[in-house]
Image: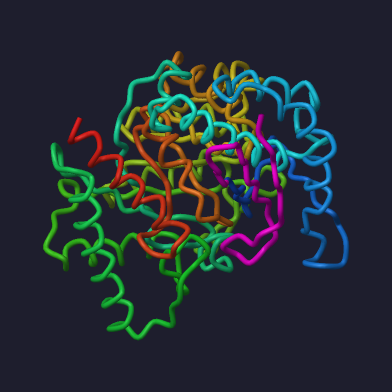
């Protein structure tokens, strides 16, 4: 037996979200749900009250659904069988987008259940996830969102995230973070020296005005080299274009271009960036509705770029088989709140792995201090992980959990 106690808390953007305490006779666990600002049309929907407070973002109805529908159905179930508890919750809301109970209601409980299962079974959470998913444990490489743009930074660029990717083979995770931190410090010095007005975006990255979408890469290049590192050897770059956000009526709009761009023209621009910078990873290069663009992305794969699908696939195991057949990408983002339960998240990961796709576990722009996704990334054998910049408590707590897991694995 266990008891669930849901309550409303605030995420890193100061917006309401959901936390659940799960209490047994011998322990207590807490879990909380993040929220995205840049969201796809395929994502499961959180339940919001749509009342006056917090512009309608409060979650009182989610709390009521947990107390009156979810809790009575599962509180007598066996915590050592978390997949069965998820299955029971999914029977209570069989809708694809979780419109009956809300993806936030389901996920808050699901996260708490898997944390409780790891304690009940006396297994580290990442090992439990590995066993349930049938995946090999791996410490991922961080994609550090060092410059924020798009919806995460008041449209300072159309592209949403500029990533720093450390490349120090056979070095511990702590070393990757420490070297990346040096580049971050050099970047801060640069923006101050150039007298740029700057701040921080939603995911902790530097935010300032740029004249083009390529200019952040030029600044990052100076930061890497100024810190004494080699581009294309010690560090590579990554990009989350989040193309949904600048796609209108079949065309793409970038401020530095005098006209809107076709899918082919946007592809050409990406190819120019790959030629000019050590751009290794490109996420969501085309809008989710742009089937022509996603077929063209094979040309980016041919250039050895890693192409990541996020809005296109949305951690959705029910849609993945059809999408995978009609688009060119070699990696997928995994965000549990896009689908609603950890069972479905693991199902999606297993499908993607079976199709030889790399996994990249990701946070959201509206985060909490719950480190669950660090264990998820290690347990699923994720190639990369996205936690944001190396600052702000809700991001750093996840990096700290990876450091803890790295130490545990070293001592095994």
Question: 219 above or below 364?
Answer: below
Question: 323 above or below 182?
Answer: above
Q: List x then y, in percent, for residue 218.
A: 30, 63
Q: Is residue 190 magenta?
A: no
Residue situated in front as seen by the camera: 58 or 190: 58
Judging from the image, the colouring scheme is rainbow
Residue situated in front as seen by the camera: 353 or 103: 103
Q: List x then y, in percent, for residue 249.
A: 72, 46
> Residue visible at 16% across and 49% down?
234
Dividing the picture into quarters, in which one does residue 150 lie?
bottom right
Main SS of the magenta part reads strand
Split into 4 quadrants, where in the image is the C terminus?
top left
Please give left or right for residue 118 compared with residue 109 in the image.
Answer: left
Please give left or right for residue 206 compared with residue 42 in the image.
Answer: left
User: Start and end of the magenta stretch?
Assistant: 1-30
Residue furthest toward the right? 51
Q: List x then y, in percent, for residue 158.
A: 54, 59
Residue situated in front as seen by the camera: 68 or 107: 68
Residue situated in front as seen by the camera: 195 or 168: 168
> Residue visible at 45% across and 15% down?
355
Residue furthest toward the front? 25
Q: List x then y, in percent, for residue 132.
A: 48, 19
> Residue visible at 61% across and 25% down?
344
Please give left or right for residue 345 compared with residue 380 in the image.
Answer: right
> Residue visible at 15% across and 46% down?
233
Question: 20 above or below 78?
Answer: below
Split into 4 quadrants, where in the image is the N terminus?
top right
Q: Is residue 10 magenta?
A: yes
Please give left or right for residue 321 compared with residue 163 in the image.
Answer: right
Dividing the picture into quarters, in which one does residue 72 lie?
top right
Q: How many marks?
A: 0
């Amino acid at each position: 037996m266990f008891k669930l106690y849901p309550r409303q808390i605030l995420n890193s953007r100061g917006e309401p979200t959901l936390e659940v305490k799960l209490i047994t006779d011998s322990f207590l666990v807490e879990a909380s749900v993040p929220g995205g600002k840049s969201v796809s049309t395929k994502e499961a929907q959180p339940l919001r009250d749509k009342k006056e407070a917090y512009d309608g973002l409060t979650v009182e109805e989610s709390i009521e659904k947990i107390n009156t529908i979810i809790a009575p159905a599962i509180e007598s179930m066996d915590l050592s069988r978390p997949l069965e508890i998820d299955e029971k919750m999914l029977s209570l809301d069989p809708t694809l987008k979780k419109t009956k109970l809300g993806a936030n209601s389901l996920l808050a409980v699901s996260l708490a259940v898997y944390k409780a299962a790891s304690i009940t079974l006396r297994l580290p959470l990442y090992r439990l996830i590995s066993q349930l998913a049938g995946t090999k444990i791996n410490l991922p490489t961080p994609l550090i969102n060092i410059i924020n743009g798009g919806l995460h930074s008041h449209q300072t660029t159309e592209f949403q995230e500029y990533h720093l990717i450390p490349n120090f083979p056979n070095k511990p995770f702590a070393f990757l973070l420490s070297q990346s931190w040096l580049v971050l410090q050099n970047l801060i010095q640069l923006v101050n020296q150039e007298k740029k007005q700057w701040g921080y975006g939603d995911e902790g990255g530097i935010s300032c005005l740029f004249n083009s979408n390529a200019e952040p890469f030029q600044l990052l290049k100076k930061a890497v080299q100024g810190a004494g590192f080699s581009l294309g050897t010690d560090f590579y770059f990554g990009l989350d274009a989040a193309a949904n956000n600048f796609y209108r009526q079949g065309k793409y709009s970038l401020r530095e271009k005098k006209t809107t761009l076709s899918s082919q023209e946007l592809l050409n621009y990406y190819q120019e960036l790959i030629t000019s910078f050590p751009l290794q990873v490109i996420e969501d290069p085309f809008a989710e509705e742009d089937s022509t663009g996603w077929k063209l992305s094979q040309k980016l794969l041919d250039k050895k770029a890693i192409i990541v699908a996020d809005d296109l696939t949305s951690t959705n195991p029910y849609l993945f088989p059809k999408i995978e057949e009609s688009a060119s990408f070699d990696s997928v983002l995994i965000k549990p709140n896009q689908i609603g339960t950890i069972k479905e998240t693991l199902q999606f990961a297993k499908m993607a792995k079976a199709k030889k796709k790399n996994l990249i576990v990701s946070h959201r722009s509206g985060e909490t201090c719950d480190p669950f996704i660090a264990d998820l990334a290690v347990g699923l054998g994720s190639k990369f992980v996205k936690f944001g910049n190396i600052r702000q408590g809700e991001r750093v707590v996840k990096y700290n959990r990876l450091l803890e897991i790295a130490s545990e694995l070293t001592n095994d």
